[in-house]
Amino acid sequence: MRMPKLLRIPSDLRNFLILILSVILVISMIFTSLAFSQKTTVKRSIPVVTYWESGDFDYLIHLKNNSLYEKPTLEPGEGVIFKRLVESINASFTYKFWCNRSSTIAGSYGLIAVLSTDLWEKEYTLLPTTTFSSEEPANNISFRIEFPINFSKFEEILSKINSETGVVARNPRIIYRCVVSIDAGKVKNVFAPELNVTLSGDIIGIENLHSHRKGVVKESKVVQKEDVKASRGLFLILDIISILALSFLLLFSEGIAEENKTLKLIRRRYSDLLVEVKNLPALEKKTKVNTLDDLIKLSDILGKPIFYRKSARGYQLAVIDDGTGYFLFVEEGESPQ
């Protein structure tokens, strides 16, 4: 059954529209295929917790009576520390922890001293491992410990080892290391700030008082790629629209041939006289006329219409009267006279 044609448009325009829609459909289907070949999810490391921790050493030096410093104590940065002027050194360590999520915080800490030289190291436990915890969920915790810097004791150990080995070790120093383990929900780490005390010569150097660290805990999560989802939907819609438009043109439209310029001109001038036929009848006598005006005059005199038919090279026009045909041939593109 032949489908009814709802739309009649010039053949050239119809063919052009079909070509354009076909190209759009092919391109759209290619991009649709590419969009569906991409994954809609991806694993990414997402920050879930940020935290900050600090370890700060401090000290207070008690001085012997002396002529250099007119005060009984020295704090960090207040002067050169001469061994002969030092009565004692009291030190402290303060630890602080903060994170952006509240949780039960627990941990432990211990203090060790490492006597270090260019040849060997020896470790001493000053404070055994001690635990701590928050009583309820919190996002911060801190503690403070105090200890002496007994440099004379370590100098005695250094002298004894040098005597036993027969080799004088150089660059002696005491490293005070507080090892802190923290467990705060997703944050689990070890922080070990160090305080360096140099013993060379008659001057004590105390360095590296402050240590700070920031951290981020990340987790791998499946994240939706919204741009891929959007492109899939967009190209599917474009596919459907292109298919519907192309189907409509192919099934419910037909192309009509455009009248050429010659026929349009004749129709515009003599539309009331023209009659289109597929074939002209066989005639006993045929007479050729020279101009369209002559053919029009004959049509008026005889009271006959002008028949015309399309041929390969143009249009054949004729006035027929009692078996006699008066003919005029107008070539394609030729202006009728």
Image (cartoon, helix red, strand yellow):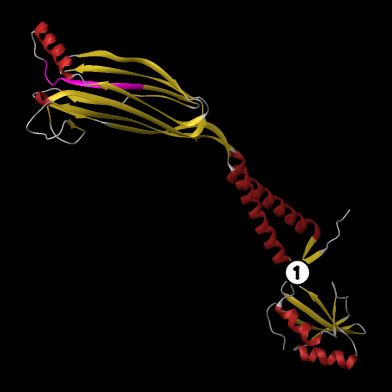
Q: Is residue 260 above or below residue 106?
A: below
Q: Position of residue 75 (x, y in %)?
A: 21, 33
* Residue 327 on image: x %, y %: 80, 83
Q: Nearer the viewer, residue 36 or 328?
A: 36
Image position, residue 14 (x, y; %): 72, 63
Q: Residues within 10 Å of mark 1 (few under 14, many from 20)?
A: few
Judged left or right of residue 98, residue 270 is right
- Residue type for callout 1: Ala
Q: Which residues are magenta?
A: 169-179
Magenta: main secondary structure equals strand
* Residue in view at x 12 percent, y 26 percent: 64
Magenta region includes residue 330: no
Extreme residue in the right direction: 322
Residue 34 x, y percent position in the rendering: 59, 43
Front one among 89 and 322: 89
- Picture residue at 49% right of the left edge, 27% below the top: 186
Q: Quadrant of the C terminus?
A: bottom right
